[in-house]
């Protein structure tokens, strides 16, 4: 979709991937995968150089996921987004970076992946007390709609349990994590 809005010379690009094409048991990987796309590096640039390139050439690239019920349907909308922005003259470089992220990402760096995973786990655990009511609400709603169930898998208590198991799996069964 294109929105012809005045943005003062800034290109905002939201690249979305429909999550319905994935098996349901892969949903918990989506937040980590989105982060890994941005933070793992490519075959030509390690994670530090890639981060510097993104910072120098763009206004940022951020992964996010979205779920929503669809009115009048039992199905939902579920997407992984890469939100990106750049000034108009850097739009070509923004697209080149996105191409590198999507086609040339290196997901086999065990230590970097574990670092991303531990940060995600720590963030989730830090939210438990101050936002416990949101976790309870999300968990209760997961029984009633596809979108809320997917939201629980990618950002609720089930997701926290998944992260804890994945940390252990990275330590003890790295090859099986790579195969997934």
Image (cartoon, rainbow, N blue to C red):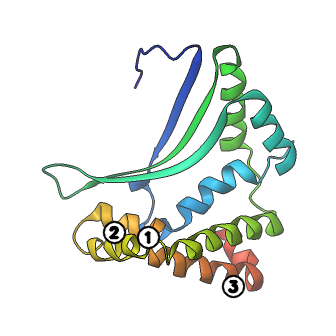
Residue 46 in sight: no
Q: Is residue 88 above or below residue 76?
A: above
Is 48 positioned to the left or the right of 130 in the image?
right
Q: Which mark is residue 153?
A: 1
**Residue at image coords 66%, 27%:** 95
* Quadrant assignment for the C terminus: bottom right
Residue position marked by numbered label 2 in the rendering? 149
Looking at the image, residue 72 sits to the left or right of residue 32; the answer is left
Q: Earlier in the sequence, mark 1 or mark 3?
A: 1
> Sequence order check: which comes first, mark 3 or mark 2?
2
Which residue is at a point 18% across and 58% down the rendered structure image?
74
Q: How many marks?
A: 3
Neighbour class for label 2 at 10 Å: few (<14), some, many (≥20)?
A: some
Query: Spatial distance from mark 2 to mark 1, Cα to Cα?
Result: 6 Å
Residue 61 percent location from the top left of the image: 64, 39
SS state under label 2: helix
Marks 3 and 2, how far apart at CA: 24 Å
């Amino acid at each position: 979709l294109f929105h012809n809005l005045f943005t003062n010379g800034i290109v905002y690009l939201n690249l979305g991937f429909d999550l319905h094409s994935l098996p349901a048991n892969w949903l918990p990987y989506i937040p980590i995968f989105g982060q890994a796309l941005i933070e793992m590096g490519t075959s030509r640039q390690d994670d530090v150089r890639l981060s510097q390139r993104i910072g120098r050439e763009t206004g940022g690239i951020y992964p996010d996921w979205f779920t929503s019920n669809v009115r009048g349907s039992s199905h939902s909308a579920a997407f992984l987004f890469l939100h990106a922005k750049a000034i108009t003259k850097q739009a070509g470089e923004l697209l080149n970076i996105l191409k590198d992220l999507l086609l040339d990402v290196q997901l086999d760096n065990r230590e970097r992946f574990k670092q991303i995973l531990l940060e995600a786990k720590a963030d989730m655990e830090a939210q438990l007390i101050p936002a416990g009511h949101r976790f309870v609400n999300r968990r209760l709603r997961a029984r009633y709609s596809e979108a809320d169930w997917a939201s629980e898998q990618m950002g609720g208590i089930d997701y926290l349990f998944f992260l804890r198991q994945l940390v252990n799996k990275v330590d003890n069964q790295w090859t099986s994590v790579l195969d997934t």
